[in-house]
Image (tube, rainbow, N blue to C red):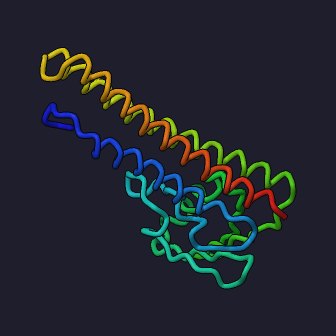
Amino acid sequence: MTSGKFDMADLKRRMQGAVGALKHELGGLRTGRASASMLEPVQVDAYGTHMPLNQLATVSVPEPRMISVQVWDKSMVKAVEKAIVDSNLGLSPATEGQVLRLRIPELNEERRKELVKVAHKYAEAAKVAVRHVRRDGLDVLKKLEKGHEISEDEQERLAGDVQKATDGTVTEIDQLLASKEKEILTV
């Protein structure tokens, strides 16, 4: 979309990027078993930037209800610990030197409801991202019409296509959320 041309395929690709990010984040919401992927969304303030946890530590699952995080740089242990606590995953690290042990609690009703709220937050962020892509596409169409590069009818038709793509993507996001919500709440 950089050359002032309208690219529907690019818009759809960007919308699917939001869906992909949501799938990744929902994958991190585990329902009671330990999984290294639970910590994938965790970003650590390290070396003056945000870094994924897996670039600072080795994450392993020594037991079904335990995650072990081996931090490579001793000076980063506190930052990693803070990032895990602040991640809304409901995990409290027990730190032993450069190793953080995370017990995965049994999911009680309250924790399940918390996880559903987090899933809703992730889904809403994905919908906002999709709406931003829609707005970008509509802005390009308006500029093209204003510059007399496309007709008003063409602009309206393409705007309808953008809205259809947006609606389809939002429906996909809602389906992903409903599926994850059911998985979390099913005992």
Q: Position of residue 185 (x, y in %)?
A: 80, 57
The residue nearer to you, when weighing 2 against 51, is 2
Residue appearing at x 71%, y 45% in the figure: 117
The residue sitting at 61% across, 50% down in the picture is 175
Q: How many marks?
A: 0
Pick the residue in front: 2 or 93.
2
Q: Position of residue 71 (x, y in %)?
A: 51, 73
Q: Is residue 126 left or right of residue 49?
A: right
Residue 10 at x, y percent in the picture: 28, 45
In which quadrant of the rendered view does residue 69 lie?
bottom right
Q: Is residue 30 visible?
A: yes
Check the image and name the residue furthest to the bottom: 62
In which quadrant will I find the C terminus? Answer: bottom right
Q: Is residue 184 above or below residue 169?
A: below
Q: Is residue 78 above or below residue 125?
A: below
Please name whichever residue, 102 or 158, is drawn nearer the observer in this view of the structure.
158
- The vertical placement of 122 against 155, above or below, is below
Q: Would residue 86 be seen by someone viewing this image from the given angle?
A: no
Left or right: residue 35 versus residue 15 is: right
Q: Which quadrant holds residue 109?
A: bottom right
In the picture, the quarter occupied by the N terminus is top left
Name the residue rendered at 16%, 34% in the picture.
5
Relative side of 25 to 142, left or right: right
Residue at 17 percent of width and 23 percent of height: 150
**Residue 144 % position (x, y):** 18, 23
Q: Nearer the viewer, residue 24 or 183?
A: 183
